[in-house]
Image (cartoon, rainbow, N blue to C red):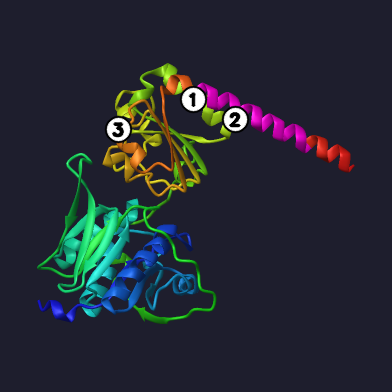
Amino acid sequence: MSMEEYRGVWVFIEQRDGELVDVGLELLGAGRDLADKLEVDLCGVLLGHNVKGLAKDVFEHGADKLYVIDDPIVEKYRSETYMKAVGDLVRKYKPEIFLYGATSNGKDLASAVATEVMTGLTADTTMLDVDLEKRLLEASRPAFGGNIMATILCKKHRPQMATVRPKVMSKLDPEPGRTGEVIEETIQLKEEDLRTKVLEIVRDTTKAVNLEDADIIVAGGKGIKDEKGLKMIQELADVLNATVGASRDIVEMGLISHAHQVGQTGLTVTPKLYFAIGISGAIQHKVGMENSETIVAINSDPNSAIFDVAHYGIVADAFEIVPLLTEEFKKALQQGEAEKEKGGVAHA
């Protein structure tokens, strides 16, 4: 294999039921930066049925080209069909970098394609860059339990591939009217030749925790200690109409379910306001929340690593300061409601 033949940055554009999954657009933002540095095209890869109309959003978010396979056989995700389709595209067009969202489908596809085309894959990366001289993708991710950041290179195989968690990268502001080249391809498979059939897709509607879309998160760590501490942060969350988050420590202590966990082995979140209460700030947790718009850290240890990423820090015992904050927020909100009602009556 001549690696000089491989050029271009590709992004897998995931769609579900004909709608784009946000992580694909987020990766176009990261991919645009890599492509500009390497002076190559940024290309999207889109599979589905009746999905050509999605090209507009892909181009407006930074892509130069879009490879489309529009066929009923790839309407629903299956490893078998998607691996064959994407593998054929890689062999034909030879991208040097290929990025996937670390969704359930994205992770499955990336690992299958890596096996199909015999290349490497870095999973759950949180930072991407390139060595321009060697044209190497520098894919970084927490390692050894989140204690260090490891930068992983794929020196001998192409394409260089990585999965990236949702919410880690930022979408570019759309550029209305921006267009690109649509390249339509076909897949040489028939339904009767496939080993798997999609009979039904059942969506889980019982999950009450929605950390990824929360505007405010009140997260607790080992410093909240017990059920009393958990109740304390829940009360603050209730007043702020916020979602409760957690570090790995209190999940492993059994105080709260894994659905609330933020960090490398949990979810990546980007709320407008993030309270880190009794959280030490290990890399494993920070990578999941450090892109929040505003971070307020409360910890009794002034040397805690969480203060390195916090916009506001309070060095205090959480059991003393959090109830006071809860009460003050409650008063402020009640006063705001009272003034709002008063203003409404006066206006009438």
- Label 1, secondary structure: give it: helix
Could you tell me residue 31's position as x and y percent? Answer: 33, 68
Q: Name which quarter of the figure residue 68 lies in.
A: bottom left
Image point (57%, 34%), residue name = 240
- Residue 326 magenta: yes
Q: Residue furthest right?
A: 348
Residue under pointer 1 = 322
Mark 1 / mark 3, whichever is N-terminal: 3
* Label 1: few (<14), some (14–19) or many (≥20) C-alpha neighbours in 10 Å: some
Q: Which residues are magenta?
A: 323-340
The Cα atoms of the two marked residues, 1 and 3, are separated by 20 Å
Q: Amino acid at mark 2?
A: Phe
Residue under pointer 3 = 303
The N terminus sits in image quarter: bottom left
The Cα atoms of the two marked residues, 2 and 1, are separated by 10 Å
Image point (20%, 75%), residue name = 91
- Work out whether residue 196 can be spotted: no
- Residue 94 magenta: no
Nearest the viewer among 43 and 322 is 322
Nearest the viewer among 291 and 30 is 291
Could you tell me residue 146's position as x and y percent? Answer: 23, 41
Mark 2 / mark 3, whichever is N-terminal: 3
